[in-house]
Image (cartoon, rainbow, N blue to C red):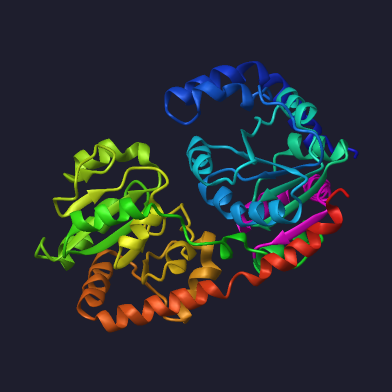
């Protein structure tokens, strides 16, 4: 594939920056953003042997993207037990989640940084037959090098914002060259499909992997112990919150719940590493420190336990939606467990899902802390309405799985015999 001038310049720039990559990765590791023991993987090196036979590679950058890959991992493993599945991710948080949720026999590695040398080392070692990138992971060195080696490429559950599409229009030939490297593009929604068409791609049917999947797992013994500790109090869960959102949600909770014996607010931050500092600022008890939820606010600052807290909750407030610039998180996680959902106004990353849930009265949007307080109070005072919202959320989630079967049929011709 002939590279355009911008893509050639990008490759040259990444080659020049490659000597600095180890120092940058070590600095990120000191801040908890990389796994210090596995930095070699980010540079294309590994001590794990490649198993013989076909190898299917699936990649997502962070927790949301890699979580959405899990149903596809399970389906491919069931359809092709002869193949090895390699899952790569770009963040330490995603790696920690995958360590608990990937099925046996699946290999996890950190994705290489997008320098030619790291990409070459990764591809030389793993030699994938097919690569499935999820959402918006368009790393030019990795994609073009994999394509040049004959790896069949798929962009699944593709998402492109209008701002990103406008940036790519500055280099239309490069956008076409990069998108044409994919044998199959399955957009999340029609808006993304239209943007991809403007850039010269030929997207296939829609597939939003965040619409499919099983309920998050739970340790039933831990759930029973936590329920006993909570006692008779109702539980409001603020899930996947970001900096600046906790203050809004705590303000709303305290306005809605004047009697601390009535209800408990549990905050599960998107990045648990924030837990200690956040717990101190909120005066909250912290699960990671082994503290029981004795106060009115409890911090669920552990990894892999969101399924427990969704089941514990009477009402779920979805984070990522009250602070601009984040775009919201997947509301189907609480919907699959049948919980009424409250959300803020900033949900661009999952706008279609939220619009459908709102239309079916499975979720309610609160533009600010005062509105959130009213909705929390309303659901606590009206259990019948909360139950109807729960049933609507559960029914909506149950209808979302059909798209995966269609995607597997499209993937099948790309898989090696």
User: Is residue 67 visible to us here?
Assistant: yes
Residue 232's spot in the image, x, y percent? 16, 65
Residues drawn in magenta = 160-188
Residue at 71 percent of width and 53 percent of height: 76
Q: Is residue 4 magenta?
A: no
- Viewer-proximal residue, 291 or 40? 291
Q: Quadrant of residue 338?
A: bottom left
Residue 199's spot in the image, x, y percent? 77, 56
Residue 263's spot in the image, x, y percent? 17, 64
375 horizontally vs 410: left or right: left
383 horizontally vs 1: left or right: left
121 horizontally vs 334: left or right: right
Which quarter of the image is occupied by the N terminus? top right
Residue at 28 percent of width and 56 percent of height: 224
Residue at 80 percent of width and 27 percent of height: 124
Q: Is residue 173 magenta?
A: yes
């Amino acid at each position: 594939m002939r590279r355009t001038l911008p893509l050639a310049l990008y490759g040259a720039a990444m080659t020049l920056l490659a000597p600095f990559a180890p120092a940058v990765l070590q600095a990120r590791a000191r801040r908890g953003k990389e796994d210090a023991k596995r930095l070699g993987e980010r540079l294309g090196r590994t001590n794990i042997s490649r198993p013989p036979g076909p190898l299917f590679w699936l990649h997502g950058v962070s927790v949301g993207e890699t979580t959405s890959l899990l149903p596809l991992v399970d389906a491919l493993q069931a359809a092709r037990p002869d193949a090895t599945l390699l899952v790569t991710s770009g963040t330490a948080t995603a790696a920690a989640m995958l360590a608990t949720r990937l099925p046996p026999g699946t290999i996890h590695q950190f994705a290489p940084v997008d320098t030619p040398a790291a990409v070459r080392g990764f591809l030389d070692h793993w030699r994938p037959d097919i690569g499935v990138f999820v959402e918006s992971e368009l790393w030019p060195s990795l994609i073009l090098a994999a394509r040049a080696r004959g790896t069949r490429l798929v962009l699944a559950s593709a998402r492109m914002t209008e701002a990103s599409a406008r940036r790519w229009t500055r280099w239309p030939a490069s956008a076409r060259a990069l998108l044409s490297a994919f044998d199959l593009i399955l957009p999340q929604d029609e808006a993304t499909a239209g943007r991809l068409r403007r850039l010269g791609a030929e997207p296939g049917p829609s597939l939003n992997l965040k619409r499919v999947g099983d309920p998050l797992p739970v340790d039933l013994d831990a759930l029973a112990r936590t329920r006993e500790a909570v006692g008779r109090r109702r539980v409001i869960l603020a899930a996947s919150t970001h900096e600046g959102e906790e203050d809004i949600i705590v303000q709303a909770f305290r306005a809605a719940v004047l009697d601390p014996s009535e209800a408990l607010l549990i905050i599960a931050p998107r990045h648990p590493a924030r837990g200690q500092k956040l717990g101190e600022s909120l005066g909250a008890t912290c699960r990671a420190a082994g503290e029981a939820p004795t106060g009115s606010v409890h911090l669920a600052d552990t990894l892999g336990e969101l399924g427990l807290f969704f089941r514990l909750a009477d009402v779920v407030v979805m984070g990522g939606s009250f602070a601009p610039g984040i775009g919201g998180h997947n509301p189907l996680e609480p919907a699959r467990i049948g919980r009424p959902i409250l959300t803020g106004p900033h949900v661009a990353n999952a706008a279609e899902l939220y619009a459908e849930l709102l239309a079916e009265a499975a979720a309610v949007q609160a533009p600010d802390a005062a509105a959130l307080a009213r909705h929390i109070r309303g659901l606590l005072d009206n259990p019948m309405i909360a139950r109807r919202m729960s049933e609507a959320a559960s029914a909506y989630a149950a209808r979302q799985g059909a798209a995966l079967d269609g995607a597997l049929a499209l993937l099948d011709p790309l898989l090696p015999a």
